[in-house]
């Protein structure tokens, strides 16, 4: 099917121009929220960083594992986990922080947790479009991935995520993500994105 240069419709403009521009402006606006509240590390920065972590090393591998297969989930988990680890590796090696002993274990935990979530989601779901199976797989894999990450973080002397608060932030936020992403995966399947 070849479209001519005059064959534009309203949805092309809305979904091809307006929506992406709004998303970019929204992302830039969210990234500047901390400067509105005095800068530095505060609650808004912490929330933004947690959402960033969940999107990069939980949501993407889980979504690809659910709608595609275990190899896509595991490979995307490796790639996204590596990107996230490289993002944090810079701050662990910065001239202001010095070289933090034990940070390698934390960075490895991000990669392994994302790989585990993506691979297990694909292996357990097996491209099923049954919503209850997808929810069960999503909750199970993200909870197990969070527990594994929390355990791996405790192997490092550079760990700052401790106690019940650290456990809740690490595990329950992933479990919540594991209940939301199957909904998105089901919508993808309705529109035939997984084929």
Image: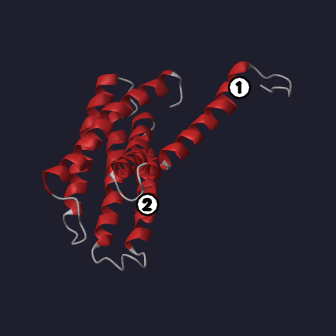
Whichever of callouts 2 and 1 sits on the residue coming sooner in the sequence is 1
Q: Nearer the viewer, mark 2 or mark 1?
A: 1
- Secondary structure at badge 1 equals helix
Q: Where is mark 2, residue-wise?
A: 82
Q: State whether residue 133 is above or below residue 144.
A: above
Crowding at dot 2, Cα within 10 Å, few <14 / some 14-19 / many 20+, comes out as many
Name which residue lies at 50% across and 31% down. Answer: 194
Residue 172 x/y as whole percent: 23, 42
Name which residue lies at 42% across and 25% down. Answer: 186
Pick the residue in front: 136 or 87: 87
Pick the residue in front: 150 or 129: 150
- Secondary structure at badge 2 equals helix
Does residue 188 appear left or right of residue 85 in this picture? right
Name which residue lies at 81% across and 26% down. Answer: 3
Name which residue lies at 77% across and 25% down. Answer: 1
Pick the residue in front: 95 or 156: 95
Residue 192 x/y as whole percent: 53, 25
C-alpha span from label 2 to label 1: 35 Å
Residue 55 x/y as whole percent: 41, 45
Say if residue 141 shows up in the picture.
no
Q: How is the image coloured?
A: secondary structure
Residue 137 x/y as whole percent: 29, 35
Q: State whether residue 95 is above or below residue 123.
A: below
Residue extending furthest left?
Answer: 164
Does residue 144 appear left or right of residue 9 in this picture? left
Crowding at dot 1, Cα within 10 Å, few <14 / some 14-19 / many 20+, comes out as few
Q: Which mark is residue 12?
A: 1
């Amino acid at each position: 099917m070849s479209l001519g240069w005059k064959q534009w419709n309203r949805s092309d403009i809305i979904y091809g121009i307006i929506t992406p521009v709004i998303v970019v402006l929204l992302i830039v606006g969210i990234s500047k929220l901390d400067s509105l509240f005095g800068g530095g590390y505060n609650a808004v920065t912490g929330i933004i960083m947690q959402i960033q972590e969940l999107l990069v090393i939980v949501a993407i591998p889980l979504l690809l594992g659910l709608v595609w297969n275990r190899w896509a989930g595991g490979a995307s988990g490796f790639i996204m986990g590596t990107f996230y680890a490289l993002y944090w590796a810079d701050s662990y090696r910065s001239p202001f922080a010095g070289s933090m002993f034990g940070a390698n274990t934390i960075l490895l935990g991000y990669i392994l947790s994302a790989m585990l979530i993506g691979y297990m989601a694909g292996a357990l779901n097996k491209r099923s479009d049954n919503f209850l199976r997808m929810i069960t797989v999503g909750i199970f894999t993200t909870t197990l991935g969070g527990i594994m990450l929390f355990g791996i973080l405790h192997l490092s002397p550079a760990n700052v995520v401790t106690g019940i608060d650290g456990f809740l932030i690490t595990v329950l936020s992933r479990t919540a993500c594991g209940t939301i992403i199957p909904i998105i995966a089901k919508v993808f399947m309705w529109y035939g994105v997984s084929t």
